[in-house]
Image (cartoon, rainbow, N blue to C red):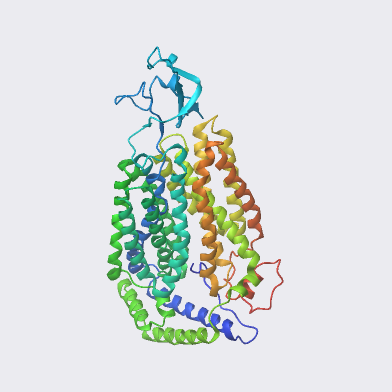
Amino acid sequence: MPKLQPTLEVVPEKPETGLEAAESEKATEESQLDAIIIGIGQFGRFQIFNYLLLCLPIICNAFYSISFVFTAGEVLHRCHIPQCDNLATSYEAPFLNFTTPQRHGSWDQCEHYAVRSDPSDEASCNASSFDADRRVGCDAGFKLSNDDNTIASEFAIFCADQWKLSMVGTVNNIGQFVGIPLGGYLADRYGRKLILVAAGVLSSFAGLARSTAPEYYSFLSLEFLDMAVGSTLFPTAFLLAVELVGPQHRVVAATMISLTYGLAEALMGYLADFLRDWRVLLRVLYAPALLHLTFVCLLPESVRWLLSQSKEVEAKATLRRVARVNGKELPEQQLDELIRSNRRLVEQSSASGGHYSVRQIFQALGGRTALCCFVWFTHTLIALGLSLNSTQLSGSKFENFSMTGFMQLPGILMATTLMNWIGRRWALSSCQFTCAALLLAVAATDEVCPFASSILYFLAKMVSTGSFMILYFFTSEIFPTNCRNSMLSFCSSVGRFGSMLAPQTTLLIVHYQYAPHLLFALFGFTCSGLALFFPETTNKVLPTTLAEARALDRSIPKVKVPKSVA
């Protein structure tokens, strides 16, 4: 995650050596690079064009990470009644009043009343032919409510096999658990552009192959493969988009990327409603990802990554190109100073080892890391859980899902304002508390006023999205520079256990209709309280060393560190 505040100049109290000297040199190099970007245009024509290009992987990732809501969606069904049903009958029929029991206000999906066995009278479609005291399974098959074609209807996944549908979402998130840290490592090693191209194309192949899956387990395997190779699209594109702009526009760029993601989710709801066939939907969603091949010629590599790899010629060429497209001048003297500073940084990093060890990090910030992991777990559980359970609300499941996408937009804008107004810590805590309270209100009002309950549900989704936005910023500010990206990836990966659990929460509805709401509220209230144990980072210089990161927390005795301007 890139820095979200400009680093201020610090005056050391004592000479720096080893890793601290390397970090100080890195801050100098970054400030020189930021000065160059300011001079050649922080958000000019070059950045706008590349931002439009990066919308492709953002949109694709939004589609792929949650398309299982519709490809593996449940289809409303009931038992086929041989004595009454024929080709002309539909899901709703008058004879259901004496052939099928009701469950939670709708027809039971897995049982019907037993047919009376009377050898003197052939069973017919009337009330006397069915015994309301005995229930049997749907041995004669099922009658579907509409023409939706998902893997549930095509692979006959009903009743006792219902767990297979929620398992698709869990496997999807297991793929993300594997793919996000792997993609982050490969992007740091081989470059952002190469990984974007490879991930986009491979994900497209996996998705198109999944659209031809002949049975459930091949579909499930390709779901995992798709996210294992494609889940890195969002974090890599996010990082590259923010690295392309100047320091004054990074928050705006990050907000625009997040807004694009929310709009893409809303769009997918309308596409699924229009197509109504999981195979066609997958082909429409995944074919455009082949356009990532054009990035080879159109998209520049990150200048920061090029400098970290000592690819100085390519870095200078990219900066000159930015200046030319934006109509600015770039003095060669500035480039020469940047290269000299970068060479010293590379030498310092090589001599000092360049990184903190895992033991050093957890000894200094173990409690903060554990707390951060729990908060990430809670956020992924609630955020994905609300999107998945939106299809259970009254009304069209497609419109409800699209509405959860649209509600992310005001949530993101609210978070951007709130965290600068009352601070990161209180904004995070208040958002989680509000989300949990709204979910309890949903459960309390649903039967009395379903419309008001739906509004409260969408407000909870809005606040949850805002809280997630704050968490992204917050996590990037509470860890030191040298391990910031790795700790963000670690906390995010642990948080994926929440998104693995979220698809299973829909199974709780069978036992109690509002069980998912209560579960989310419990975690939300807990997270709200624990978030107050984080240190406040608003308007503070980002920490560059473990000592400075520890000093952010007033409950930890401050270690003597270079003075910094707050």
Q: Is residue 212 left or right of residue 426?
A: left
Q: Nearer the viewer, residue 446 or 241?
A: 446
Q: Quadrant of residue 182?
A: bottom left
Q: Is residue 134 left or right of residue 328?
A: right
In the rendering, at what x and y percent does residue 56 appear? 34, 59
Residue 301 visible in the shown view: yes
Name the residue furthest top. Answer: 120
Name the residue furthest front. Answer: 119
Residue 466 visible in the shown view: no
In the rendering, at what x and y percent does residue 51 appear? 36, 63
Examine the rendered structure and indicate whether residue 370 appears above or below residue 453.
Answer: below
Q: Nearer the viewer, residue 481 or 359?
A: 359
In the rendering, at what x and y percent does residue 299 appear? 32, 69
Q: Is residue 188 left or right of residue 492?
A: left
Examine the rendered structure and indicate whether residue 505 appears above or below residue 375.
Answer: above
Examine the rendered structure and indicate whether residue 92 appears above or below residue 213.
Answer: above
Quarter placement of the C terminus = bottom right
Examine the rendered structure and indicate whether residue 318 appears above or below residue 202.
Answer: below
User: Residue at coordinates 40% horizontally, 48% vertically from top-left?
Assistant: 68
* Total labels drawn: 0
User: Residue at coordinates 68% horizontally, 78% vertically from top-left?
Assistant: 560
In the rendering, at what x and y percent does residue 392 appear? 47, 38
User: Residue at coordinates 54% horizontally, 33% vertically from top-left?
Assistant: 446
